[in-house]
Amino acid sequence: MDKELSAILKELLAYFGDEYYRNWLYDNREQYISAYDCFNIVTCLPMDLNKKLEYIERIRPHLSDRQDEIVLATVKAYELGLELLNEEGTDILFQVTERGRYTLKGIEFFEDHSAPFHTFQQFVEYVESLYDEDEDYKTKTFEDFWYVIERYRLVDNEYKYEANYVITGNLDIINVYYPWENDRSECVLDSESQTWYRPDMGRLFLPMPYKEGDILTVDSQPFHRPHHAVVIYTHDNNLDCCTPGCLHYMEDGYMCGEHRRYVDCHSIKHYYCGQEELSPLINVGLYEGELPEDEALIGAVSRYIKTHENGAREIDEFRDKEDEEKLWKFISK
């Protein structure tokens, strides 16, 4: 990795929350990190599309032609998304479809009765009106809350869905998604770019230095409650997207009002994938403190692995490891 790309990588890793992990990635960049990895990091970070475009432009000279197909599609998608935001007209509508934030009890969704807006600026003015005179939405962060906005255009007396934006509390546009054409939507991105474009912000497959028995912090706010996971297996190939495998408590069902919490086990790199997600790798870190009472199982599994010669393999091969009661019995024998 040359000096210029190393400098770019260092800037990108500054967005990562854990000092040890970002230093490890930087120190091992020659072995593990490619220019394409730098591109992937950019697409997964919660930064404004304009800033993402600036970073991609700096990274592109270091990429191969084969990889440029995905990169060029991403550039087109981001540029079109920003262009569509600036369009005005009575035939255009921006509709808030989701507003939420993380709380200690989980994900809290807000009812939003804002009317459709004909311009994005009208939405900005609406957000400004929500705050007192001494408050400023620009001080809000991604962790405070987020918005999802859909854009529609009037076609043959029917509004067609064209794009979907993920927006932070301070109104940074961090992601854009385009639907495929159907009865209710129009595909506004050219077909080749639509084929190559990957709007999945949770899809970040970087190497990790952790070993069996380690307890990791899983922090993908604001979409998920911070919690902890224990590593129960690793693969020899650190670049494999399926390693390290971690056991943790998965929580979902917030949007439909059916909150569920259950034991789950698979690669931490696959925990959260989607356009409205944040990869756990952005804020992952080794955790050595006290665990909350509702995560006692995570600590118990870690101790079992560290005190049994083949403990990690035993846990991994235990068929009912995702059954909390049976797993407690297994490690307590």
Image (cartoon, rainbow, N blue to C red):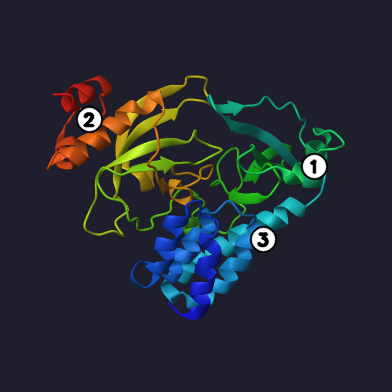
Left of 63 or right of it: where is 120?
right
Q: What's the residue type where badge 1 is placed?
A: Asp
Residue picked out by circle 3: 50
Q: Indicate the quadrant containing the N terminus: top left, top right, bottom left or bottom right.
A: bottom left
User: Height in image: 214 above or below 298?
Assistant: below
Q: Earlier in the sequence, mark 3 or mark 1?
A: 3
- Frontmost residue, 173 versus 248: 248
- Frontmost residue, 290 versus 280: 290
Circles 3 and 2: CB distance less than 8 Å?
no
Residue picked out by circle 2: 321
Q: Residue at x 39, y 36 (%)?
A: 228
Q: Residue at x 35, y 25 (%)?
A: 262
Badge 3 crowding class, 10 Å Cα cut-off, few under 14, some 14 to 19, many 20 or more, is some
Nearer to us of marks 3 and 1 is 1
User: Height in image: 20 above or below 90?
Assistant: below
Give the secondary structure at mark 1.
loop
Residue picked out by circle 1: 136
Give coordinates of residue 113: x percent, y percent: 74, 26
